[in-house]
Amino acid sequence: KKSTGMAGGDPETVQASTCACPPGFEGDGLRCADVDECATTCKGEHMTCENTFGGFKCSCDSGYGRMEDASSPDGMTCLRGGGGFGAGTVVTAVAASCAVVAGGGYLVYRWRLRSYMNQEIKAIMAQYMPLEDGDAAPGAFAPNGHGESDDEEAMNDRL
């Protein structure tokens, strides 16, 4: 009032206070009524709207999932089958990927370990007995005639 009187206006014509309705309500500020937002929002396909006190709630029909969509007037779109990648889908995909990688790594490890162990066993056995493919170490005793022993050479020299 004071600023209106100082500006040359009649201070008696200015209201002592101004009332306004909060968002989601309409009226003169002294009497406010809930606005039915469902009359103007949630108009996309497979959407349902629930008017709440001072607001509203958009949801998708059964069998459809919500996906945020900035290009939609409602800010969302309802898609069949759950609506894209939710947190559960991402967690499942990560867990499955880890299982596949771990299983593949284990199989490669087993194959490499088995190959290494087969080579080691073959080398150890070749020191004590000849193998079927004739890979006996030089001078190793070979009862099947695939190699010669130092003892056999010594006996042949004595005769």
Image (cartoon, rainbow, N blue to C red):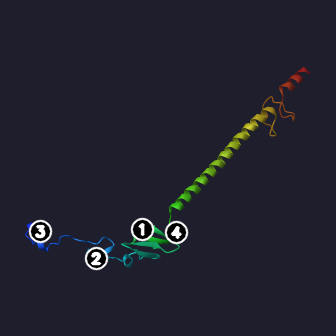
User: Which mark's residue is nearer the viewer, 4 or 3?
Assistant: 3
**x, y percent for residue 127:** 78, 32
Marks 4 and 3, Cα distance to the nearest angstrom?
A: 60 Å
- Which of disc 1 and disc 2 is earlier in sequence? 2
Q: In the image, is 23 to the left or to the right of 147?
A: left
Of the numbered discs in the image, which one, if any, rests on residue 4?
3
Q: Mark 4 is on which residue type?
A: Gly
Choose the circle earlier in sequence order: 4 or 1.
1
Amino acid type for the residue under numbered disc 3? Thr
Going by the numbered disc 1, the residue's amino acid type is Asp
**Residue nearest the observer in this picture, 65 or 20:** 20
Between disc 4 and disc 3, whose residue precedes?
A: 3
**Which residue is label 4 attached to?**
82
Residue at 52% across / 59% down in the picture?
A: 90
Residue to which mark 2 is pinned: 31
Calculate the distance from the C-alpha at mark 2 to the C-alpha at mark 3. 27 Å
| Label ID, residue 120 | none
| Quarter assignment of residue 123 | top right
Quadrant of the rendered structure where residue 16 is?
bottom left
Indicate the position of residue 137 as horizontal and vertical percent values. 78, 32
Q: Which mark is residue 69?
A: 1
Write down the quadrant of residue 26 in the picture. Answer: bottom left
Q: Secondary structure at mark 1?
A: loop
